Image (cartoon, rainbow, N blue to C red):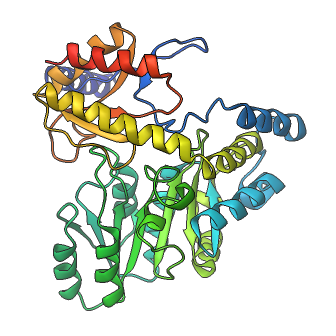
Amino acid sequence: MTGWLEALDRLARERAKAGLTRQLRPRGATDTIIDLAGNDYLGLSAHPRVVAAAQEAILMYGLGATGSRLVRGSTAAHAALEDALSAWLGTAGALVFSSGYLANLAVVRGVAAVCDLIVSDAYNHASLIDGCRISGVPVTVAPHNDPRAVAAILDAHPGRAAVVTESVFSVDGDLAPLAELHEVTSARGALLIVDDAHALGLLGPCGAGGVAAAGLSGQPDVLVTATLSKSLGGAGGVVAGPAPFLAHLVDTGRTFIYDTAPPPAVVAGVLAALGVARAADDRRAVLSSRGTEIAGRLREAGFPVSPPAAGVLSVPAPGPEAALAWATDCRDRGVAVGCFRPPSTPDGSSRLRLTLNAGVPAADFARALNVIVECAP
């Protein structure tokens, strides 16, 4: 009767031996740790305008959306956010989901109706990989950030394909060659799907993202996804692109149709954050300066890193145990950093992931740099 539990115990011991055990660490509302691990890049999650908008909406609508988007979950707040997102991203329309993960599942599965091959970058996020797995069409994994390899794959395929990439990759923080990839896909009648999660709010005019920075806003063969939980400090996800594709997702997208809508209070807060983010060139300048500073300090300490393309900086560690010990030592000294080990890392290596946050006071940021360097293995 308990054989399956014993099997799970054995797997847990194997993970522990390999240094791959993970642990939940609940934090309190008064947590004072310096955060270089979360994704609140622009420091908007507690911005007064954002909090006030969420408070007003919760008094108007209550705690939850009370249903899926197609039943009772769509509110005026959802429609306003979709209009604002499509205007910011320069697309014909936008569709809001309850998470970026679900948005990515929807977009990849959605293009399977008109494509018979998906080409996925080797370093793509787990949500895009899972979308490929459930798409029902053949998937070819392309070498990381290699437009020539993508072109060769497409040239060998007689049908219509979709190429899937991130704009700023979530583990290493490097930038995809989106303009070159679009030259490849558009010349071959393929679609380009870009997860802009780690570029939205940070790159492009008014922070409109990596797609906008590459000059691809509104292209009819480009689909954009993003999470609303990073630079916008809230929760939820978005798919943006041509109206016929969004209508296709409304009619057929399982993670849209069968999922409860994001709470109106969160949606209203994200809408307020979007307004702040569009005008936040000062915060983006702070992030750029801090990225250069932290990369310089780490290079001086012997770590081969470059200034981040956006807000993610990846620092190699000797192995999973060393990465975990490094992150734990930093936490014990009041600094939260990301610890990325397999299977979160696409190449099987381990590293610390540092995420910049414009809301961290300058003195705290300087202290965090000292702690990270001093705790290095």
In the rendered image, residue 295, in percent from the top left (x then y), is placed at 25, 35
In the rendered image, residue 181, in percent from the top left (x then y), is placed at 30, 74
Is residue 79 or residue 216 the one in the foreground? 216
Q: Quadrant of residue 158?
A: bottom left
Q: Residue at x 34, y 38 (%)?
A: 291
Q: Residue at x 74, y 36 (%)?
A: 49
Q: How many marks?
A: 0
Q: Quadrant of the N terminus?
A: top left
Q: Is residue 292 left or right of residue 34?
A: left
* Residue that protrudes farthest toward the top in the picture: 332
Q: Is residue 306 visible in the rendered structure shown here?
A: yes
Is residue 123 or residue 132 the one in the foreground? 123
Q: Is residue 45 left or right of residue 77?
A: left
Is residue 195 or residue 199 the one in the foreground? 199
In the rendered image, residue 292, in percent from the top left (x then y), is placed at 31, 38
Q: Is residue 229 visible in the rendered structure shown here?
A: no
Q: Is residue 78 left or right of residue 157?
A: right
Q: Quadrant of the C terminus?
A: top left
In the rendered image, residue 362, in percent from the top left (x then y), is placed at 46, 22
Q: Residue at x 64, y 60 (%)?
A: 85
Q: Residue at x 18, y 18 (%)?
A: 376
